[in-house]
Amino acid sequence: MHDYNERYRRQMMMKDFTPEKQEKLKNASVFVGGIGGLGGATAAYLASAGIGRLVISHYGNLTETNMNRQLLMDINRVGEPRVDIAYENLMKINPDLKLEMHNVRLNDENTPELIKDCDIAMSARPNFPERLSLNKACVDKGIPMIEAAMDDMNGYLFTVMPHETPCLACNMPADDKDWKELGFGVLGAVSGTIGCLAAVEIIKILTGHGEPLNGRMMFIDFMKMRTVMPKLNRNPQCPVCSHK
């Protein structure tokens, strides 16, 4: 038997983090697109915070090169679907979690169905087509989305509030043909840090606890430990959100 109130007692000790806010997490449903080094950290900390339901998509099997950053994985299970391994480890973190796993790539056809019952989504796929599909589906359905990514020793995140803030397509209107999926270096601690920040942002939005990154990007240069917060602008000709 698990004691729910005891498990989350330290969270509810935070100033103004009331039992009602914890109950909002318990009743919330979050979509996480990608459970690699970044999305896996987000999923793990959402599970440990008491999120009621996670819907996760991630295509592909575990490889040994994943192991420097994907802490939900198990090196003894190389070759198995990552969603299966992550499912078992997330349930160890929070056995009360309702968890749906999908071994698929996101596209314009399947993404709306995957996110349809979710309160918020998090974008962590390693390619632009999947990110843009999730962005479009979230804008169309009015679902907030956290866009988070990293490359080498840099990382960023920002929040898309449909009809209020710039969306991903405002700033990246098309796929970058010069960018290759998995063609960049990764330090696991960098991807994990950005994933943790995304989890914080999701919890803030779901509970109303704190100020979200609406209209701003948090960019971190880990080489110099420098953070900048540029303002993002909506594109009046954006093919995704300008007509909304």
Image (tube, grey):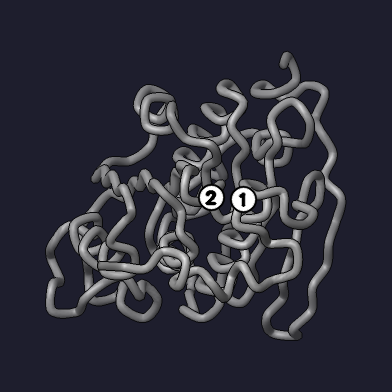
Q: Which secondary structure, mark 2?
A: helix
Which labelled disc corresponds to residue 100? none
Q: Which residue is mark 1?
A: 20
Which of the 4 image quadrants contains residue 74?
bottom left
In this rendered view, identify the residue nearer to me: 171 or 241: 241
Residue 236 at x, y percent in the picture: 82, 23
Residues tagged 2 and 1 counted as in contact (Cβ below 8 A): yes
Where does the N terminus fall, quadrant-wise? bottom left
Q: Which secondary structure, mark 1?
A: helix
Residue 40 at x, y percent in the picture: 40, 64
The residue under the point 52% across, 53% down is 179
Amino acid type indicated by mark 2: Glu
Where does the C terminus fall, quadrant-wise? top right
Question: In the image, is residue 173 above or below residue 58?
Answer: above
Which of the 4 image quadrants contains residue 170?
top right
Q: Which residue is mark 2?
A: 23
Q: Is residue 227 left or right of residue 38?
A: right
Q: Is residue 143 left or right of residue 43?
A: right
